[in-house]
Image: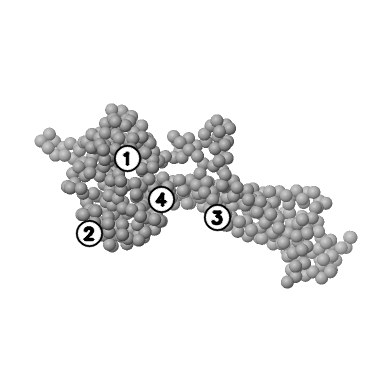
Amino acid sequence: MNFLPVTIGLRYARAKRSNHFISFISFSSIAGLALGVAVLITVLSVMNGFDRELRQRILGMVPHATVWGEPTLDDWQETARLVEAMPGVVAVAPHTQAQVMFQSQYGVHGALLNGIDPALEQKVSIIGNHISSGSLDGLNQTRFGIILGEQLARMLGVKVGDKVTVILPKANVSIAGITPTLKRFTLVGTFKVGAELDASLAYINIKDAATLKRYTGDGVEALRIAFDDLFSAPTMIWDIARVVPGQNRVSDWTRTHGNLFQAIKMEKTMIGLLLLLIVAVAAFNIVSTLVMVVTDKRTDIAILRTMGLTSGQVMAVFIVQGIFIGLLGTLIGLGLGVAAALNVSDVIAWVEGIMGTQFLNGDVYFISYLPSELQWSDVRFIVISAFIMTVMATLYPAWRAAKVHPAEALRYE
C-alpha cells in the first residue's frame, strides 16, 4: 500500500500557510464543526434527560399494564399470584378506579379516584416516594381517608385533616328521587410528582373504594402489573391475558400515554435533524477550504504529477487533508459535547446561584432543574454522520485537484 498520498495530505494539513485567508477558513471549518457536534450532543442529552424524567414520573404513577374484570375480578388474590409467577413480572397490586368530582367549600374539580392497597401499591408505583404531606399509611389508619395530588388539593383549598366530598356519577333511586352518590373523605396526605398528575389523581383505600362503588366483599376492578422492562408491556400483557381465567379486558401504558412519548421521540428526531444541519454547514465549509488550497497548490500538484503521482493519488492527498480537518473538528466537538452533557445540570445550577434566579420553576414545570442523560448511541450517530459529511465534502475539491494539467499549471512558473 502506497502511503505517500497520506503523508503529503497530512503534511499539507499541518503546514502553516502563507495565505492567511486560507488558514482562517480552515480554522473556521474546524471551529464550526466542533461547535455543531458539541451543541448536538448537548441538546440531545438534555432531551434524553427530559424523556427520562417524564418516563420515571408519569409511568412511575400509571400502571405498566392492567387486567380488568367485568366488572370485578373473581378471586383476585389467586389471579395476582398467577400473574406474579410469570417471567418478567415484578409486582402486582389490586386497583379500583372511578371518575369523580371533588367538592370543598372553595370549589369543585374533577379527577381520577384510585382505590389501592397502600402496601402493595408501592411495589408497582412511585407514589410512596412522592408524599409531600401526611403519609400513605394514613389510608389504613383512617376510615375513608384520601390522598390528593398537591395541585388538586391547592385548587380545592384543603389541607391534611380537612374534609372533601366525593361525588360519584352513579345515581341512587329513592322516594326522594334520583340523587348522585356522595361520600365525605378526610384528607390524610398529598403527593407531588411534578407532572399534570398532581391535578388529576387521588387515592383511597381499596376497601373504601369497594364500599363507595358497592362491591360485595373485597371485590376489586383490576390488577396493576409492573414489568422489569416497561417496553415489553404491550406484548407481555397478551401472554397474561391468555393465562388469566375468565373474560377480562387488558390494557397497557402505550394506550394511555403512548402518544405523549411518541411526540417526545418525534420532537427529539426533528430537533436532531435540524441541529445536524449545523454540522452539515460546517462540514461543507471544508469544500471552500480545499478549493482554495487546490488553487494555492496548483504548482505543487503539477510537480507531483510530473514525479509520477497518478490522478487517484492526487485525489487521495486532498481527501486525507479534508478528513484530517473534519476529524479534528469532530473530536474537539466530541470532547466538548460529552463534557457539557455530563455537567450541564451542575453548570446551570451554578449560573442560577450566581444570578439569583431559577430558569425552571417547579411550580410551573414538572421539574426544577435541567436534566441530562448522555446516550452513547446518540454520540456514535453524531460522530459517524459528521465523518460521512466530511468525506463527502472532500470529493469535489479532490476531483478538481486531480484534473489539474501539469503543463498548464507550470506554464507561467
Task: Answer few, some or many: residues within 10 Å of disc 4's Cα (few below 14, many 20 plus, some between 14 and 19).
Answer: few
Q: What x and y, as percent, mark residue 371?
A: 51, 44
Residue visible at 32% across and 40% down in the picture: 136
The answer to which of 315 and 342 lies nearer the viewer is 342
Which residue matches tag 2? 246
**Foreground: disc 4 or disc 1:** 1
| Between discs 4 and 2, the one toward the N terminus | 2
| Between discs 3 and 2, the one toward the N terminus | 2
| Helix, strand or loop for disc 3 | helix
Does residue 157 appear to the left or right of 278 in the view shown?
left
For the residue marked with disc 1, what is the amino acid? Leu
For the residue marked with disc 2, what is the amino acid? Gly
| Between discs 4 and 3, the one toward the N terminus | 4
Whole-number angstrom distance, CA of label 2 to CA of label 1? 33 Å
Which residue matches tag 4? 259
Whole-number angstrom distance, CA of label 4 to CA of label 1? 30 Å
Image quadrant assignment for residue 302: bottom right
Which residue matches tag 1? 136
Whole-number angstrom distance, CA of label 4 to CA of label 3? 25 Å
Q: Is residue 242 above or below residue 258?
A: below
> Marks 1 and 3: CB-CB under 8 Å?
no
Quadrant where the C terminus lies?
bottom right
Does residue 239 appear to the left or right of 334 in the view shown?
left
Whole-number angstrom distance, CA of label 3 to CA of label 2? 46 Å
Q: Does the rendering let one see residue 182?
A: yes
Residue visible at 45% across and 38% down in the picture: 365
Task: Answer few, some or many: residues within 10 Å of disc 1's Cα (few below 14, many 20 plus, some between 14 and 19).
Answer: many
For the residue marked with disc 4, what is the amino acid? Asn
Q: What x and y, as percent, mark residue 378?
A: 55, 54
Task: Answer few, some or many: residues within 10 Å of disc 2's Cα (few below 14, many 20 plus, some between 14 and 19).
Answer: few
**Foreground: disc 4 or disc 3:** 3
